[in-house]
Image (tube, rainbow, N blue to C red):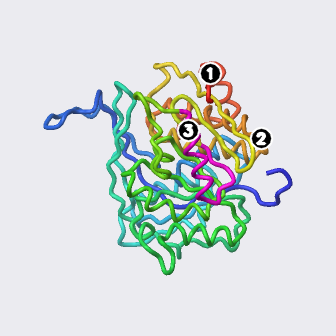
């Protein structure tokens, strides 16, 4: 980021109302389970990344582009954005639509999550809602393929609407990153492969990089660091990215095109420190780009990322436990770091 004139981020795509529901454990089929708590909060990739960045580094400007319904949930989400100082000039509201909502279940026994969603307003978001002509932001953070019906479909001469938006952003001088979610591998690959020639960065988890590249990234019940590295290199070969970052529970690997490879173990979070994992991936990405925007070396960017993700685990929602990056780093040091990763 050093010397560049652009500053801040545009978050585009998913804003949804999360109903964060906690269960003692995920129920078996044909049984019933009591909901222990129900908390309403903002969610979705555009919301989580934007709010996360503003909480980590209030000096970094964020603007957002989204579509919500003219209803109480849409008003609530706009309030979340405004409360965090996010520019909502392109927060579009369409009467007659219901705002995208998610039932986000967390099993308190393991901290695992299950999402059931009604896309509603998100299905009507199109490339025409995106205008970058006046933006002086550094990067567009866009998501989520598989959640927006019109963007998932072909748009004019492009394979899908995601490609059209990414092309528009780069033509306007913004760099690009695409946020993914864990969906069927065949569907994810079909949606994302056409986008890779239009990306500057790709920050994903081990499942997603495996789906994109067709490389199995899990062995013996855990993540294989060596195959994750191979998948990151393959993604660079088939895309335009200058940097690929892959995160997983034990750590993360960052690979630069024609440059260095850096890996960093994750934070050793005590079981008592985990309330829910909803939004941890978004927090990781926000932490990483916070470091990048500040001009930090890759090693520090990965520590920023892991620290933000670790802090986010302290709440059932996606961002309320995220503090300034300095506080997150202090928390990570207090918890301690896992043993250094060994990658051949």
Tell me where residue 189 appears, x and y as whole percent: 44, 57
Left or right: 147, with 310 as reference point: left
Q: CA distance from mark 2 to mark 3?
A: 18 Å
Q: Residue furthest left?
A: 30
Q: CA distance from mark 1 to mark 3?
A: 15 Å
Crowding at dot 1, Cα within 10 Å, few <14 / some 14-19 / many 20+, comes out as some
Residue that appears at 42% across and 63% down: 148
Image: magenta residue range: 225-245
Magenta-span inclusion, residue 291: no
Instruction: Please give the residue where the numbered disc 2 appears in the rendered image.
Output: 296
Relative to 192, is 303 above or below?
Answer: above
Of badges 1 and 3, the one in the foreground is: 3
Chain-order first, disc 1 or disc 2: 2
Q: Quadrant of the C terminus?
A: top right
Of badges 2 and 3, the one in the foreground is: 3
Relative to 284, is 174 above or below?
Answer: below
Tell me where residue 117 appears, x and y as whole percent: 34, 53
Instruction: Please give the residue where the numbered disc 3 appears in the rendered image.
Output: 247
Tell me where residue 60 appears, x and y as whole percent: 72, 50
- Which SS does the magenta portion mostly show? helix
Crowding at dot 2, Cα within 10 Å, few <14 / some 14-19 / many 20+, comes out as some
Residue that appears at 32% across and 49% down: 116
Q: Residue furthest right?
A: 3
Q: CA distance from mark 1 to mark 2?
A: 19 Å
Secondary structure of the residue carrying tag 3 is: strand
Left or right: 261, with 271 as reference point: right
Q: Residue 166 shows which numbered tag?
A: none
Confirm or deny contact between disc 2 and disc 3 (CB under 8 A).
Answer: no
Q: Residue 337 shows which numbered tag?
A: 1
Residue that appears at 56% across and 38% down: 247
Displayed quadrant of residue 146: bottom left
Displayed quadrant of residue 229: top right
């Amino acid at each position: 980021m050093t010397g560049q004139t652009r500053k801040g981020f545009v978050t585009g795509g998913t804003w949804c109302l999360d109903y964060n529901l906690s269960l003692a454990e995920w129920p078996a089929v044909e049984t019933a389970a009591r909901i222990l708590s129900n908390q309403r909060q903002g969610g979705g990739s555009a919301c989580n990344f934007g709010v996360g960045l503003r909480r980590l580094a209030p000096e970094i400007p964020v603007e957002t582009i989204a579509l919500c319904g003219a209803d109480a949930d849409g008003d609530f989400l706009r309030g979340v954005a405004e409360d965090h100082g996010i520019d909502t000039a392109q927060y579009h509201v369409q009467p007659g639509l219901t705002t995208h909502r998610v039932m986000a279940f967390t099993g308190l026994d393991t901290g695992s999550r299950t999402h059931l969603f009604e896309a509603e307003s998100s299905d009507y978001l199109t490339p025409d809602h995106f205008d970058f002509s006046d933006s002086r932001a550094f990067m567009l953070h866009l998501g989520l393929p598989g959640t927006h019906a019109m963007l998932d479909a072909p748009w004019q001469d492009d394979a899908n609407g995601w490609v059209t938006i990414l092309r528009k952003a780069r033509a306007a001088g913004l760099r690009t990153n695409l946020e993914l979610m864990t969906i069927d591998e065949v569907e994810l690959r079909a949606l994302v492969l056409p986008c890779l020639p239009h990306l500057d960065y790709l920050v994903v988890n081990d499942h997603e990089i495996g789906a994109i590249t067709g490389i199995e990234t899990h062995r013996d019940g855990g993540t294989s660091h060596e195959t994750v590295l191979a998948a990151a290199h393959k993604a660079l070969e088939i895309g335009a990215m200058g940097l690929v970052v892959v995160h997983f529970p034990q750590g993360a690997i960052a690979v630069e095109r024609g440059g260095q490879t850096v890996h960093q173990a994750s934070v050793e979070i005590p079981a008592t420190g985990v309330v829910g994992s909803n939004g941890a991936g978004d927090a990781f990405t926000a932490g990483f780009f916070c470091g990048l925007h500040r001009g930090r070396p890759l090693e520090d960017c990965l520590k920023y990322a892991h620290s933000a993700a670790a802090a986010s685990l302290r709440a059932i929602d996606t961002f309320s436990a995220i503090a300034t990056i300095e506080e997150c780093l202090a928390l990570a040091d207090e918890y301690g770091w896992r043993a250094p990763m060994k990658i051949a």
